[in-house]
Image: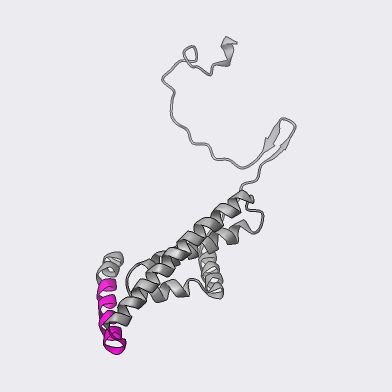
Amino acid sequence: MPLLLLFVALPLIEIALFIAVGSQIGVLTTLLLIVLGATLGITILRGQQARAVAMMQGGLRVRPGSFLAEGAFRVLAGLLLILPGFLTDSLGLLLLIPPLQRAIVRAIGARATVTTAYARRDGDVVEGEFEVHDPGRDPMTPDHRIDDLRRH
């Protein structure tokens, strides 16, 4: 239900803002601002693509986690800027502010649970955490299975 409300309320808010801003600064200036916002969004997305390629070629050596978070914020900001409207443009510009990005990451991190599994190999012994999922009884007898080691 909240998602449906968002899809109904967002266009209505944007239309109201178009009318309010257009009556204050004029229709031509309003349209120019919308086109400028979309152009900025496209530029950000193109820049993010080049940045991602450069980081992948460099092997993500410098802060891969923050690179991914910053990239996600830039992509979302670019998409919001491409959407026509002053509210989405404002939200997109806000997402480009690094202190706000860090605050959002901290807020999400406070609610997230991270599970880490480590594996170490010493000779033929591999230590690690695992979970067994029993697929059920195999209908093929061991004589008909491809991975049957008794045949060799």
Q: Main secondary structure of the magenta part?
A: helix
Residue drawn 50% across and 17% down? 146
- Front residue (pair 151, 101): 101
Q: Is residue 23 left or right of residue 51?
A: left
Q: Position of residue 106 (x, y in %)?
A: 55, 69
Residue 22 seen in this snapshot: yes
Is 50 above or below relative to 111?
Answer: above
Q: Position of residue 98 (x, y in %)?
A: 56, 72
Q: Position of residue 33 (x, y in %)?
A: 36, 77
Residue drawn 44% across and 67% down? 77
Residue drawn 46% across and 13% down? 144
Question: Is residue 21 one of those drawn in magenta?
Answer: yes
> What segment is highlighted magenta in the picture?
9-26
Question: Is residue 53 one of those drawn in magenta?
Answer: no
Quadrant of image for the C terminus: top right
Q: Residue furthest right?
A: 123
Q: Is residue 36 left or right of residue 4?
A: right
Q: Quadrant of residue 128?
A: top right
Residue drawn 43% across and 71% down? 92
- Front residue (pair 124, 40): 40
Residue 115 seen in this snapshot: no
